[in-house]
Structure formats: structure tokens, C-alpha cells
Image (spheres, rainbow, N blue to C red):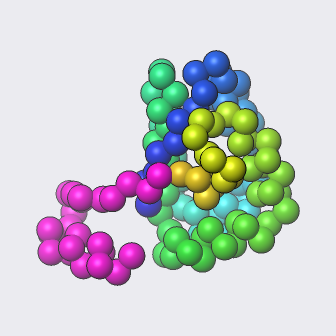
Amino acid sequence: MCFQLQVRPDRIEEYKERHRQVWPEMQQALRETGWHNYSLFLREDGLLIGYFETPSLPDAVAGMAAREVNARWQAEMAAFFEDLDGATPDTGFLRLEEVFHLDEPATMMDEKRTDS
């Protein structure tokens, strides 16, 4: 799963600082609900790209939605982003389509697209 968000340019340094200190209980909740190999990449203009692996995106999102720690984290983080239109960061992101994967033939990519 890959996604995009836009961090407000005036909040970039604070956003980075917050992610140097992600609460241990938030990290544990992510692991327990199926968010694996999770990374965030931030460009200097605030473009944020996130990537994680999960057996089931709907289950991973639902699992986090049920966690109190996630509600607190999302409420605190929402002010860092542009264009959420009332959504929280974990539901307001733009999902990016995977169009190439080095270790999978193109036919497997087509099958993945029809499954999601």
C-alpha cells in the first residue's frame, strides 16, 4: 500500500520531530493491526509518501479505527496536513496504484489490481 498526503510547509519540522517520537503504544497498535514495513518519505515542500505492507487494507484500517490511541494520534496530527476536507490523515490520504514491482511479472500486477 502506498499513499500520498501534503504536510503544511510551515509545519514540516514539527511533523518530523513528532515522528522521531511516535508513541510506543501507537507503534504497537500499528503492528498488532497489520501495518508492517511502514515507512514515510517527506519531500522538502511537504509532499508525503507513505508505504506499508498488510495482508488486508480494510482490516488494517478497521483495526486502527477501533484503537483509542489512534483516535488521539489522528486528532493531534490532522493539523499538519492540507486538503483533508474533514477526514483524518489515516482516512484522507490519496491511495497510489502500484504499476510495477521488480519481483512480480506484469500479469501478477494486473491480478492484484482487480482484487483490490
Q: Is residue 22 above or below residue 88?
A: above
Residue 47 lies left or right of residue 72; in this view the side is left
Identify the residue at image location x=51%, y=76%: 56
Residue 32 visible? The answer is no
Q: In terms of image quadrants, where is residue 20?
A: top right
Identify the residue at image location x=48%, y=22%: 45
Q: Magenta stretch?
A: 94-116
Identify the residue at image location x=66%, y=73%: 62
Q: Nearer the viewer, residue 47 or 51?
A: 47
Name of the residue lying farthest toward the front: 85
Residue 96 drawn at (x, y percent): 38, 54
How many badges with numbers are in the image? 0
Residue 87 lies left or right of residue 110; in this view the side is right
Residue 85 lies left or right of residue 43; in this view the side is right
Identify the residue at image location x=79%, y=42%: 76
Q: Was residue 98 drawn as part of the magenta stretch in this picture?
A: yes
Residue 4 drawn at (x, y percent): 47, 45
Q: In terms of image quadrants, where is residue 35?
A: bottom right
Residue 22 drawn at (x, y percent): 73, 42
Q: Is residue 66 above or below residue 72?
A: below
Q: In terms of image quadrants, where is residue 60?
A: bottom right
Q: Is residue 72 above or below residue 83?
A: below
Q: Nearer the viewer, residue 90 or 37?
A: 90
Q: Was residue 4 drawn as part of the magenta stretch in this picture?
A: no
Task: Give the position of the N terminus as an image quadrant.
Answer: bottom left
Residue 71 visible? The answer is yes
Task: Give the position of the C terminus as an image quadrant.
Answer: bottom left
Residue 106 drawn at (x, y percent): 14, 68
